[in-house]
Image (cartoon, rainbow, N blue to C red):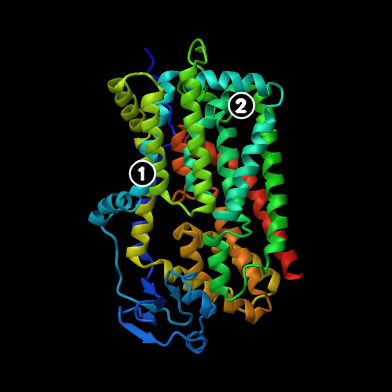
Amino acid sequence: MENKKKKLSFPTALTVLFIVLIFAAVLTAVVPAGLYSKLIYNPKSDMFEITTPDGEIEEMEPTQESLDELGVTGNLDKFLDGSISKPVAVPGTYEKVEQQPQGILKILLAPISGVYDTIDIILFIFILGGCIGVLNYMGAFNAGIAVLSKVTKGKEYILIILITVIIAAGGTTFGLAEETIALYPILVPVFLAAGYDVMVCIAAIYMGSSIGTMFPTINPFSVGNASNAAGISLAEGMGIRAVALVLGVAITLIYILRYAKKVKADPTKSICYDQYEHHMKKFGHQGEVPEFTGKMKLSLTVFGISFCVLVWGLVSQGWWFDNMTALFLACAILLAFTSGIGEKNFMDQFIGGAADLMSVALVVGVARGINIILENGMVSDTILEFFSGAIGGMNPIVFIILMMLVFIVLGFFISSSSGLAVLSVPIMAPLADTVGVSRAAIVSAYAYGLGLISFITPTGLVLASLAMVDVTYDKWLKFIMPLMGITAGFSAIMLVIQLFL
C-alpha cells in the first residue's frame, strides 16, 4: 500500500499571529530601543506635561509659545479641548534607552494581556455569537435568506454594491472597522444563497471598511488626529481625499464584481472552492428550507432593529463596545421570548453560538498582544527615527511617495490610527516644510499608507475577519494582493496630484 503524502496546508489565523508575535519579540532584541519625549495636556493641573525618555516629567505652561519652543505643530486649542488626548511625540528628542528584549515569559504573557486589553471587543463577539446561535437553531436565517434570494434573483450584484458603499461611507466618516465583525455571520449566508463565495462577502465588508478608512473625509480618529498633530485644519486636503474615496470605491467595486461574476458563472474558479462544502454546511441552506414562521419573522425583526439602533448609537451617540454589547444583550433577552424554543434550549443554543466564535475572540486578543510586545520593547520610536532621518531633503515627488511607504511600514508596528497619527505626524510634518510639500499631503500619505497595510497586516482586523468565516490567510492574500497593488499605484498618483493643487 502506498503511503499518501500529507498535503501541506496554510496555518490558521492563531498560528500566523503567534509566528508574528515571536518575530516581534526578536525585533525587540535586535532593533535598538529608543523613545521620544511625549507631550500631553493635563486638565487637572492645567499644565503641559513632557515625559522624557528616562521617565522624568517636566511641566510647561499650556501656551502656543510652549508648543513653538518644543517644535510641536498641534494647535493649542486642540490640546485644551481634548481633541488631542494621546501623548504627542516631541520632534528632535529621540534618545536610545536600555534594551528591553521580550523573552519567553513576555511572549507568553502578551496574548493574555492582549485579551485583557480587548475584553470589550471579545465580550461583544460572544454576545453576538449567542444571538446568532439561537437564530440559526430556529432556522430563521435559512428561511429569511430564501425569501431574500427570490427578491434579488438576477440582480444579486446590487447587494455587493450596497454593502461596499454603505460600509465605506461609515469608514470615511467615523472609522467603521471593528464593528463590521458583526456582519459576517449574517451576510455570508446571503452571499452564498446568491451564488457567490465567502470571499465576495469578505471583500464587500472588509474592503468597504478599509477603503473608507483609507480615504477619510471627516474621520476624527485618523485624519482628525493627524490634521491636529500637523497643525492644520481638517478641511485642508479633504477635497482631494473625497475624490480619491469615490475613485477608490469604484476601483474596489470593479475588482470585486469581476471576481464575483466569475465565481457565479463557474464555482470552481473560487479561491475558496476547496472549502465549498464546508462553507455551505456551516453557512448555507441545510436541507429543506423551513417555513418562514411568525416567530422567525419576529425574531429577525428584533435582530434587525438591534442593528439599526447600533448604527444610530455609533453615528450620533459615540458608542463604543460597552454600549454595543449591552444592546445585543438586550436583543438576546428579547430573543429568549420571541424564539419560543424554551429556556433551557435557548441557553444551550446561546452558549453554543458564543463558543463558535471563541477562535475569533482569541485572534483579537493575540493580535493586541503583538502590539504590546512592540510597545514594551520600545522599538517603534526607533523605526520612526530611522525613517524620518532617511527621507529628509528629497525631491518632493520622491519624498511624498516614500512617505506613504514609510507609513505602510509604521502601520504594521502601530496599527492604531490615532496612535500612529500623534506619534509620527509631529515628526514627519516639519520634514515636509523642508522639501516644499504641504502638511496636508503628509496627512494624506499617512492615511493612504495606514490604509494599505490594513489590507493584509496580521496585527490589524483582517485575521479576525477571516476567522469569522473559516478562510485561511493565504487565500486572502491571493485574492487581495492584485487589488492592493492597483490601490497603491492609484494612491501614489493621488498624492502627486495633491502636490500641485
Residue 118 located left or right of residue 478: left
List x then y, in percent, for residue 406: 55, 65
Q: Nearer the viewer, mark 2 or mark 1?
A: 1
Disc 2 is placed on an element classified as: loop
Evaluate whether residue 21 shows in this view. yes
User: What residue is at 54 percent from the left and 51 percent from the top?
Assistant: 315
Q: Residues within 10 Å of mark 1 (few under 14, many from 20)?
A: many
Q: CA distance from mark 2 to mark 1?
A: 29 Å
- Dot 2 and dot 1 residues touching (CB under 8 Å): no
Q: Nearer the viewer, residue 429 or 324?
A: 324
Image quadrant of residue 243? Answer: bottom right
Image quadrant of residue 100? Answer: bottom left
Type of amino acid under label 2: Tyr
List x then y, in percent, for residue 480: 59, 42
Type of amino acid under label 1: Ile
User: What residue is at 43 percent from the left and 23 percent from the top?
Assistant: 136
Evaluate whether residue 19 shows in this view. no
List x then y, in percent, for residue 380: 42, 66
Residue 50 located left or right of residue 422: left
User: What residue is at 48 percent from the left and 71 percent from the top?
Assistant: 84
Residue 386 tag number:
none
Q: Which residue is mark 2?
A: 196
List x then y, in percent, for residue 148: 61, 23
Figure check: 308 above or below 432:
above
Residue 122 tag number:
1
Q: Nearer the viewer, residue 468 or 3?
A: 468
